[in-house]
Image (tube, rainbow, N blue to C red):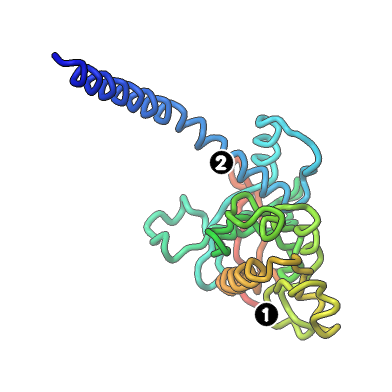
Amino acid sequence: MSDRMKTICFAFALCLVCSLLLTAASTGLKPLQVKNIQMDRKKNILLAIGLIDSRRIYQASEIDRLYKKNIFKYDTDQTGTIIDPSAAPEMAQDNLLPIYLAIDNNNKIISYIIPIETRGLWGKINGYLALQSDGSTIKGFTVYKHFETPGLGGEIEKKWFQKNFVGKKIVDQNNHFMSISIAKGRAADQVPEEKLPNYVDGISGATLTGQYLTKGLQKILSEYEPASVRFRQNLLQCRMQTDEPWCENEKEK
């Protein structure tokens, strides 16, 4: 065998071994990666409702404990009815929207959280928006994944930007749906005073990120509006069922 052929065979064998090692590592680490992703999402849900402090470092076991104690996942249909996924397996998932309820020790809903997945400037923006049980006031907002430009649109992951959402409204003064919008700069300089409750300050130099996020939030909140209306009308009541609360839909008032 010529030296040239030996070199080619060695290179091929090296590439094959490296490929096998990378594949094995990727396959072996996948369960850990999935677990870390799930834990990060739980952490962001807890951050959205203020149950943990973003300045603290929490062990995974503590995050899991707080999540299991306070957060319960259900689905909501197009009428805003809260549905137990295990009680209605025959319903097509395409017709249901996931909703997370934060419930205290007295089985009282203190907040509901909806997942955010919308287009950004360079890719998808994923996060959670928490609303108070009044169905109109934002309790918190977090982003756990995005592809925005660091120092510009990437500021959507920073606490200073996210805290601007707290206390804002998704309805106008007449209790009609308005969603929440991101201003181009300081909201007080851009919009009339009566609309300020529906706007947050934008990020300097990241107008497009703000526009994409605004459109995404409007679309998602409009899809969840039937559920929000039920919260505004106080049509949900929770009771204990086995080891966790179950929230029933009362008749419309």
Q: Earlier in the sequence, mark 1 or mark 2?
A: 2
Q: Is residue 12 above or below residue 106?
A: above
In-front residue for pair 146/207: 207
Location of the C terminus (image quadrant): bottom right
**Residue 23 sits in which quadrant?**
top left
Residue 168, given in percent of the width and then of the height, sits at 79, 69
C-beta proximity under 8 Å, tags 1 and 2: no
**Residue 26 sits in which quadrant?**
top left
Q: Give the residue number, with chain letter if any, for mark 1.
A: 177
Check the image and name the residue furthest to the front: 3
Q: Give the residue number, with chain letter if any, for mark 2.
A: 38
Image-based side of 224 in relation to 53, left or right: left
Dot 2, how many residues are within 10 Å of its Cα: few (below 14), some (14-19), or many (20+)?
Answer: few
In-front residue for pair 172/211: 211
Q: Secondary structure at mark 1?
A: loop
Residue at position x 73%, y 48% in the image: 47
Residue at position x 54%, y 60% in the image: 122
Residue 1, given in percent of the width and then of the height, sits at 13, 14
Image-based side of 113 in relation to 37, left or right: right
* One can see residue 226 in this view: no
* One can see residue 3 in this view: yes
Q: CA distance from mark 1 to mark 2?
A: 32 Å
Residue at position x 39%, y 27% in the image: 22
In-front residue for pair 183/140: 183
Q: Is residue 225 above or below residue 146?
A: below
Residue 132, given in percent of the width and then of the height, sits at 75, 62
Q: Amino acid at mark 2?
A: Gln
Residue 76, given in percent of the width and then of the height, sits at 54, 63
